[in-house]
Image: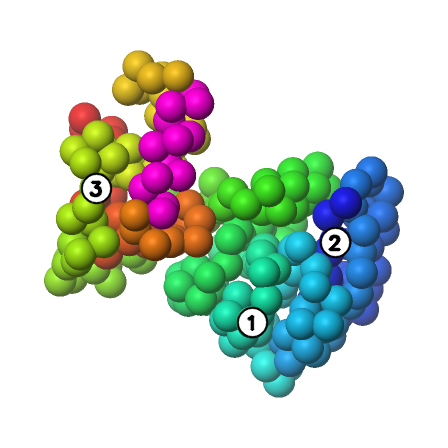
Amino acid sequence: MIRVLLADDQALVRAGFRSILEGEDGIEVVGEAADGGEAARLARRLRPDVVLMDIRMPGTDGLAATREIVASTEARVLILTTFDLDEYVYGALRAGASGFLVKDSEPAELIHALRVVARGDALIAPAITRRLIAEFAARATHPDPGPRLSALTEREREVMALVAAGLSNTEIAARLVLSPATAKTHVSRIMTKAQVRDRSQLVILAYESGLTVPGWLADA
């Protein structure tokens, strides 16, 4: 059972999400919060698996709440965003959010995103990815590989770059002529060596360390 906490300052929006989620097998809405502060408090008390978090809320916003929730609980945060919030998206990713979903997504996309994040993977809506990667690149003006990447093998660096390019384990396996299980093992080992929580954090590290740059895969 995936336990979900809803955080949005609009009661009608929360009611809509609850209606969608409660009709799904294996998903339970355990609470609702109208601002980030309440979301953080409820996350500590209710211990949800996933917090569905709006970013722009009065008082404590979703960015600050995400940082607090990730630091104090095992819950994963799925951010609701819009196309013009790149700065917020980048900040939330740095704060530890595991996924991003556009607010006008279809119900099936919401369900899929919750299941992906709940099982420990990361999800970024495709419509957000290109602008988000450009933001990473703009900020990584002084790339620094750091000690975390020095422990990686050449193959692991190659796999990490493909993760940063947005490829799934299955797509990585096909490109490198590996089995999907082997690709998954590589990704798990990389995250352990790099000391990151999930694939989203791995993407940040890849760009900020200079391991990869936007557009390299199209030219490869």
Q: Earlier in the sequence, mark 2 or mark 3?
A: 2
Dot 3 alpha-carbon crowd within 10 angstroms: few under 14, some 14 to 19, many 20 or more: some
192 and 93: which one is in front?
192
Q: Which of the labelled discs sits on residue 3, or is there none?
A: 2
Q: Is residue 23 left or right of residue 42?
A: right
Q: Which residues are magenta?
A: 180-192
Q: Which quadrant holds residue 190?
A: top left
Q: Which residue in the protein does label 1 denote?
A: 72
Q: How far apart, in angstroms, are the residues tagged by discs 1 and 3?
A: 29 Å
Position of the C terminus, as image quadrant, is top left
For the point 58% across and 60% down, which residue is it? 74
Q: Is residue 180 above or below residue 54?
A: above
Pair 2/3: label in front: 3
Q: Which residue in the protein does label 3 denote?
A: 152
Position of the N terminus, as image quadrant, is top right
The answer to whether one can see residue 40 in this image is yes
Amino acid at pointer 2: Arg
